[in-house]
Image: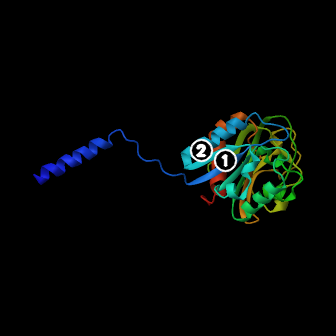
Amino acid sequence: MLRLLLGGLLAWSACSLVGKDPPEKPAAFQVLVFSRTEGYRHNSIPDGIAAIQELGVAHGFQVTATEDPGYFHPDSLTQFAVVVFLNTTGDVLDSLQQEAFQAYIRRGGGFVGIHAASDTEYGWPWYGRLVGTYFKSHPRIQEAVVRVVDQAHPSTQALPASWTRTDEWYNFRENPRVNGVQVLAVLDESTYEGGQMGEDHPISWYHLYDGGRAWYTAMGHTAQSYAEPLFRQHLVGGILWAAGRAR
């Protein structure tokens, strides 16, 4: 009799679970994607947000996308492992928000800058050193060859040593190496028109800065960039490294 009762109970339990979705795993960490513009606005911003959200689903992190600088408050920033500046331009934070962001980085926060993040906050030297340098100019959108010089980093390990792609190629006010960055990839200026930095033209880099982790790529102007598998691998590797989830 006891055996029959136990068998029935097990059968009921199995049936009751049929059609039930497994519980969702909690996000490994949270990412804030900030895309406020006070200058030129990139049409690719929605594509960039969608790509990062898709990468979050695939890699287990949660994405909050906003243009509200009110998120730059100590109580808000503490929940995020990484803050992404996605094609921001101009002065996007006031002095109190700048202080909150500095404190966030100094507590070990992560920063990812994409393309026009270097065309942001020209009057805030701390931010310029966080990014690595500031934007100066660019030629027309065209194809060029990116030379990957560090294939050990998670943002470049999936990339070919010679990577041909189309984008808007930035020239910078100064070489970011002067601010102590580790260069991941450089542009081969012999493969396109309008380069102004010579043989050493960094286009992607990372560094430890003021207690935090900062990663930047000057690629990502075009909407098509965010559909490119290799560029998405480049991007998610930078996010994971900035979050301290990859070495």
Of the residues shown, which amino acid type is indicated by label 2? Leu
Which secondary structure, mark 1?
helix
Q: Which mark is residue 151?
A: none
Residue 84: x %, y % from top left: 71, 49
Residue 145: x %, y % from top left: 75, 42
Residue 213: x %, y % from top left: 71, 60
Vertical side of 139 occupied by 64: above or below? below
Q: Which residue is mark 2?
A: 55
Q: Which residue is mark 1?
A: 235
Of the residues shown, which amino acid type is indicated by label 1? Leu
Number of labelled discs? 2
Residue 126 shows in the view: yes
Vertical side of 121 occupied by 78: above or below? below
Q: Nearer the viewer, mark 2 or mark 1?
A: 2
Q: Residue at x 54, y 51 (%)?
A: 27
Left or right: where does residue 13 sit relative to residue 186? Answer: left
Vertical side of 24 occupied by 206: above or below? below
Tag 2 near tag 1, CB within 8 Å: yes
Residue sitting nearer the eye, 11 or 76: 76
Instruction: Answer with the quarter of the image where residue 242 lies.
Output: bottom right
Give the quadrant of the C terminus: bottom right
Q: Which of the two labelled residues, at mark 2 and mark 1, occupies the earlier sequence position? A: 2
Q: Residue at x 13, y 49 (%)?
A: 4
